[in-house]
Amino acid sequence: MHDANPEPSPFDHFLDEGLIEHVIRPIKSGKEASVHLCRANPRTTGHDLLALKAYHPLNRRDFRDESMYRDGEWIKPRRVRVALEKKTTFGRQVQGSIWVNREWETLRALSEGGVSVPAPIERTEDAILMTYVGDEELAAPQLRNYRPDDTAEAQDLFDQLLRAIERMLYLNVVHGDLSPYNLLVWDGILVVIDVPQAVDPRKNRHARSFLERDLERACGWAEAHGLGADASRLTADYWTAWEFADLIPEDLRGLTM
């Protein structure tokens, strides 16, 4: 028996708007979302290939405890705050919407600020269309699966990673869950992905500890490839530099979130 009211596909809006022509194949699936390679409409998007990140239906998402990530955010309507705290069905819907919206806004800010991230193209309540990293045959590998040719290449990738973390901080963004799992490598370029949990260090009391955790994971990768790195020192240096606004690079002034 056919369902008289099937759930709409996360691809429908993008197909109807003429942004994509068809879905080529799934790229990966995680606890909260799946990513699909799409044939783009170059006349409307300027691209031949795009990636569509489709968040799973609410009953399939593995919602983490968001309280530390939401620290410092004020949601005015009391009923919404209560629903989030009690994790009601409505609260889960709000949480899901916040998660998608935060990723969209963060990708926009980082892309405009010159951080190497997929550039967002269009969004719905449960999906984001963005630029794709890779080619039609092969998606860019995660850093955890990438094997640098030599120490010099490993150093270059690590330097790119540190610059990305620093530049994100200057844009008032701390990734909050950075690891070799959400970093891609393609043609020698490191790309940061998966930013729905990103926090604003001006508001979130846990931002410095999130930054240090991001840097510890980065330095752990570097040390595994024979490079010396001190996460505590880097955290102190970056945090101090961020606190002094006059140290923000000239090209980033006015672009902060």
Image: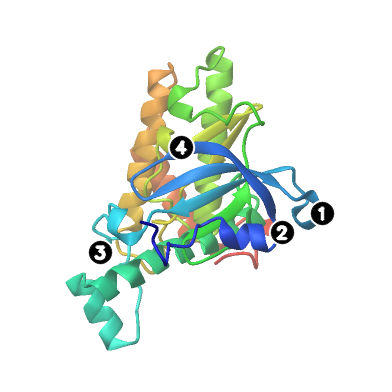
Q: Residue 28 carries which label?
A: 4
- Of tags 3 and 4, the one toward the viewer is 4
Question: Mark 1 or 3 closer to N-term?
Answer: 1
- Which of the 4 quarters of the picture holds residue 107? bottom right
Q: Which residue is drawn at 34% across and 51% down?
A: 210
Name the secondary structure under disc 1.
helix
Label 3 to label 4, Cα distance in Å? 27 Å
Q: How far, Cα to Cα, is label 4 from label 1?
A: 27 Å
**Amino acid found under the numbered disc labelled 4:** Lys
The residue drawn where x is 30% and y is 64% is: 205
Question: Is there CB contact under 8 Å for labels 4 and 1?
Answer: no
Q: Badge 3 is on which residue?
A: 67
User: Residue drawn 41% across and 68% down?
Assistant: 97
Apparent side of residue 1 relative to residue 163 in the rendered image (left or right): left
Q: Which residue lies furthest to the left in this view?
A: 86
Q: In this view, does 49 lie to the left or right of 179?
A: right
Q: Tell me the crowding category of disc 2: few under 14, some 14 to 19, or many 20 or more residues within 10 angstroms, Cα based.
A: some
Disc 3 is placed on an element classified as loop
The nearer-to-camera label among 2 and 1 is 2
Exactly how many numbered labels are in the figure? Answer: 4
Residue where numbered disc 1 is placed: 43
Q: Are marks 2 and 1 in contact (CB under 8 Å)?
A: yes
Residue 222 in percent (x, y) is at 43, 25
- Mark toward the start of the polypeptide (3 vs 2): 2
Which amino acid type is shown beneath numbered disc 1? Answer: Arg
Q: Which mark is residue 171?
A: none
Residue tagged 2: 18
- Vertical comparison of 187 with 37: above or below: above
Q: Which of marks 4 and 1 is nearer the N terminus?
A: 4
Badges 1 and 3: C-beta atoms under 8 Å apart?
no
Counting residues from the N terminus, which is met first, the one under dot 2 or under dot 1?
2
Horizontally, residue 239 falls left or right of residue 170, namely left
